[in-house]
Image (spheres, rainbow, N blue to C red):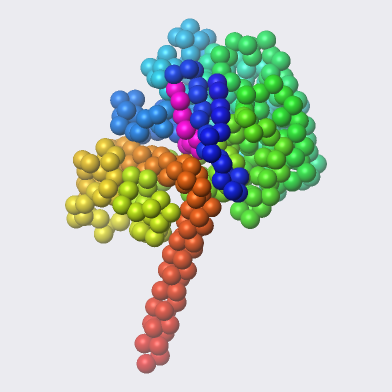
Amino acid sequence: MKFSVKAWSKGGARAGVLQVGGSCCLETPALLLTTRKGLPSFISPDLLSTLPSPDSRLLQFSPLHFAEGISMKTISELGGLHQMLGLKDHVFVAVPRDSIISLPDYQSANRLGASFETPCGRLLMKPKQYMEMISSMKPDIWSTLADEVPAWVSEKRNRASVDRTVRWLDECLTSDLASNTGGAAFGTIVGGSRIDERKRCAEEVAKGNVSGFCIGGFGLGESLDDRPALLRAIIEHLPENKPRQICGLGLPEEILQGVAAGVDLFDSTYVYHLTLGGFALTFASAENKKHDVCDQLTELTGSDGTKINLKATIYRKDTSPIVEDCKCYTCKNHTKAYINHLFNVHEMLAQILLEIHNTHHYLGFFRTIREAIQRGRFEEFHRNFVEARRNYYCGSMMDEVVVMERDGKESAC
């Protein structure tokens, strides 16, 4: 694996190139597509080719999903996850975290290993067991085992989680199976909402023989306002020539917050949860070239400025595509009315078509971010996006107040 930074913004955001396996070259910041056992929940392998390439080749999976079912020995005999799924040109990134079903207190730990809530129930994972899974699956990138904790745990529990994570880092890297993984190891950084513990963990992990870093423990109850300081405490202790991945940030504003801090890869379940709820992304993307990249955010449409609910009755007779200028398979072939009908009759095709659009659209959002960084205008893009969202919400709230006041006066009359 090779990584190089090609452009910097004034505030610290960076655009780079990540080369994996000699054949796959990816631009960063980039999105890791969330999968269940190696594949997106509603997109089959043949439909993956309809997504922008190579942006869609980064696939994140959790080894925990393979805890029961097909054995590790069978996966190893098949040649690893690439061979088993028939996706030789894709990049698999293993993260020991089930973000889809996780609860705020989803994980605890003891001296032996980490405890996870999985589809098969609660599971205790030891570093040795974890490395056996990694060596059998042979992902391109894998994160070391970590003890992540929510933001509200005690200082003692937080400090213990850092100690365990650093110890498990050494156990994973010095394991006899580490040389048999065939992939690049990313050291996991934890520390909860404590800046001093985040710094300590980052310093210790940076000393290890790792190819990159996986920043964990976010999206577990910390304040949005506290994140910049926590991210700065981590990033300033990491070398610039290695990629940084983060788990737990998924909303567009959160992605921009991570990019501004210097994060390169984002492991997010945002698209999955949108699709499951019937929401379609609609905000302007990089495909719309009619306007400057930093002016596109003035054209935000949808129920909250970024998305619309396709289950709503208003779309029952809407024969337009989800987004007029979108070049995804769904928008080129189907209408809002058809997808609304599929939801009403509970057809899985609704989620399939919607996830294709949402994934395609969010990948376009990342392309827009990279373009803004390369042009030296990321700070302006970030500010415009946040202000547009804030203005939308403030405008909506004012409309509600006006209606309430008007209704109150009418009642009084």
Characterize the magenta stretch by its predominant secondary structure: strand
- Against 36, is 378 above or below? below
Residue 309 in sight: no
Q: Report x, y in % for residue 372.
A: 47, 46
- Residue at the far bottom in the pictured view: 413
Horizontal side of 379 relative to 108 (left or right) equals left
Residue drawn at (63%, 55%) of the image: 225
Image spot of residue 401 (x, y percent): 45, 77
Query: Does the magenta segment cover residue 25?
Result: yes
Which residue, as the protein is rendered here, is positioned at the far right? 156
Visible residue check, residue 304: yes
Above or below 40: residue 270: below
Q: Is residue 356 or residue 260 the one in the foreground?
A: 260
* 181 in magenta: no
Q: In this view, does 130 lie above or below 331?
A: above
Q: Which of 102 and 244 is in front in this view?
A: 244
Which range of residues does the magenta coloring cover? 24-31
Residue 106 position, x and y percent, is 62, 39
The residue located at (41%, 79%) in the rendering is 402
Q: Which of 361 and 9 is in front in this view?
A: 9
Q: In which quarter of the image is the C terminus?
A: bottom left
Classify residue 295 by image quadrant.
bottom left
Q: Which residue is drawn at 44% across and 19% down?
A: 23
Q: Which residue is drawn at 47% across and 33% down?
A: 27
* Residue 67, quarter of the rendered image: top right
